[in-house]
């Protein structure tokens, strides 16, 4: 089978949906011919991934025009120069090109969350992305979502079958402890710390809540914040203002193995997001056996169940109380972490999830699928 993937920035991945797609296509490349459309500004000309072809698409400058031009130019390339059995479109905001693609291909589309709920977009862009939700729902031949709450919401709103395929973890994650130690030392981080990490740090990630909560704790620990603070300068300045002398800011860590090394050394990992679909970061931290304190949004509680300690989303006072409890009950938190590690490795394994994607591909190619829910 010849499968094209469209809708992400590119590979190798750095964060977000790219991480999900990379995990899927690495496995698909063992059994199918895989083509991935990439932003030429994101994917280096020398980039190479075993068993697959990376097509670098030139894009227009500017945050909004880059994404728009990437999706349009990728779709045009697929139409006029491609010859695929199916196209897998990732991210709902890319689905406005599906009507074009559908004229030639069978289409499966995956929702990684509702982008208009993120603060990185202005009001006009958010309204436009909301409208594209309709394109995601109505035009592909098959729909999937990495979030169970979102899958249920789309099914209820549009009367469509939306297959829930969660994000997953590797059975044996690669950890680069030496690079992690070097990065921590260069940024003044000592051995014992509470950790926050995100690819792009925006207000929906909740870092400000953590800084407010941590500032009220009388503990001899550092708080380490890892991530890209450059995209929202005003928010970055606010975080710097809120930080007390125990806080260390570490720039975005590109290498996953190095980031995992930083995670593995943490006393606690705090995940205060107010908006998520199904966070890869959360699952990967759990797979590394690190205790987790996170917000009680359904996407988090649904992913980890009783294996994490939850605080009321958006409530910094409750977060402070839960952090203090977690630090005072180290054995209990470690037991939760061990159960979480076992849970995600057994139930959210990428090898198993890739088999499910492959099964859906076969159903799509044979036409043995319906996007609309059967009438009762």
Image (spheres, rainbow, N blue to C red):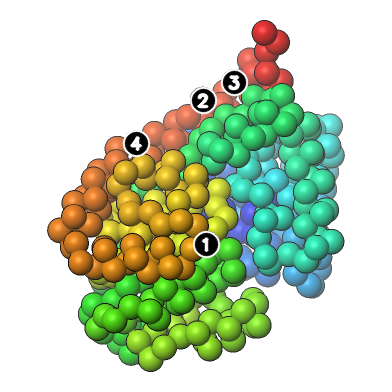
Locate residue 355 relative to residue 201 in the image: left or right: left
Dot 4 falls on a residue whose secondary structure is: helix
Q: Residue at x 52, y 62 (%)?
A: 314
| Of labels 3 and 1, the one closer to you | 1
Mark 2–mark 3 CB contact (< 8 Å): yes
**Is the residue marked by circle 3 packed among few (<14), some (14-19), or many (20+) residues within 10 Å?**
some
The image quarter containing residue 275 is bottom right
Locate residue 148 relative to residue 282 in the image: left or right: right
| Of labels 2 and 1, the one closer to you | 1
Q: CA distance from mark 2 to mark 4?
A: 18 Å
Report the residue marked by disc 2: 359
Give whichever of discs 2 and 4 has the lower sequence position.
4
Q: How many marks?
A: 4
Give whichever of discs 2 and 1 has the lower sequence position.
1
| Of labels 2 and 4, the one closer to you | 4
Q: Is residue 257 visible?
A: no
Report the residue marked by disc 3: 363
In the depicted structure, whether residue 153 falls above or below residue 130: above
| Of labels 3 and 4, the one closer to you | 4
Give whichever of discs 3 and 1 has the lower sequence position.
1
Q: Residue at x 83, y 37 (%)?
A: 99
Dot 3 falls on a residue whose secondary structure is: helix
Give whichever of discs 3 and 4 has the lower sequence position.
4
Q: Residue at x 50, y 46 (%)?
A: 299
Locate residue 263 relative to residue 83 in the image: left or right: left
Q: In the image, residue 40 lies at what x, y percent?
A: 68, 66
Tell me the quadrant of the picture where the N terminus can be found: top right
Q: CA distance from mark 4 to mark 1?
A: 29 Å
The image quarter containing residue 84 is top right
Residue 154 versus residue 41: which sits nearer the camera? 154
Report the residue marked by disc 1: 314
């Amino acid at each position: 089978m010849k499968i094209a993937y469209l809708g992400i920035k590119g590979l190798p991945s750095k964060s977000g949906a790219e991480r999900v797609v990379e995990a899927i296509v690495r496995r698909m490349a063992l059994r199918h011919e895989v083509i991935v459309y990439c932003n030429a500004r994101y994917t280096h000309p020398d980039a190479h991934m075993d068993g697959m072809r990376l097509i670098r698409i030139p894009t227009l400058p500017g945050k909004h025009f880059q994404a728009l031009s990437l999706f349009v130019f990728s779709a045009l390339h697929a139409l006029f120069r491609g010859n695929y059995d199916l196209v897998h479109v990732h991210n709902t905001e890319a689905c406005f090109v599906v009507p074009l693609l559908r004229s030639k291909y069978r289409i499966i589309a995956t929702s990684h969350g509702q982008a208009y709920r993120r603060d990185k977009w202005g009001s006009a862009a958010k309204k436009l992305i909301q409208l594209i939700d309709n394109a995601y729902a109505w035009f592909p031949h098959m729909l999937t979502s990495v979030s169970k709450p979102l899958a249920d919401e789309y099914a209820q709103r549009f009367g469509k079958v939306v297959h829930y395929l969660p994000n997953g973890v590797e059975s044996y994650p690669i950890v680069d402890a030496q690079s992690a130690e070097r990065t921590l030392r260069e940024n003044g981080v000592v051995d014992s710390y509470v950790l926050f990490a995100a690819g792009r740090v925006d207000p929906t990630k909740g870092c400000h809540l953590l800084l407010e909560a941590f500032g009220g704790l009388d503990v001899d620990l550092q708080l380490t914040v890892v991530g890209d603070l450059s995209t929202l300068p005003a928010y970055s300045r606010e975080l710097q203002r809120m930080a007390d002398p125990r806080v260390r800011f570490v720039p975005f860590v590109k290498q996953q193995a190095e980031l995992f090394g930083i995670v593995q050394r943490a006393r606690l990992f705090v995940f205060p997001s107010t908006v998520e679909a199904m966070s890869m970061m959360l699952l990967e931290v759990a797979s590394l056996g690190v205790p987790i304190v996170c917000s009680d949004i359904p996407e988090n509680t649904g992913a980890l169940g009783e294996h994490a300690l939850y605080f009321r989303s958006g409530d910094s006072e409750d977060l402070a109380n839960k952090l203090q409890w977690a630090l005072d009950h180290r054995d209990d938190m470690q037991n939760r972490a061990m159960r979480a590690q076992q849970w995600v490795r057994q139930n959210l394994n990428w090898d198993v999830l890739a088999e499910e994607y492959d099964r859906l591909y076969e159903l799509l190619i044979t036409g043995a699928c319906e996007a609309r829910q059967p009438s009762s």
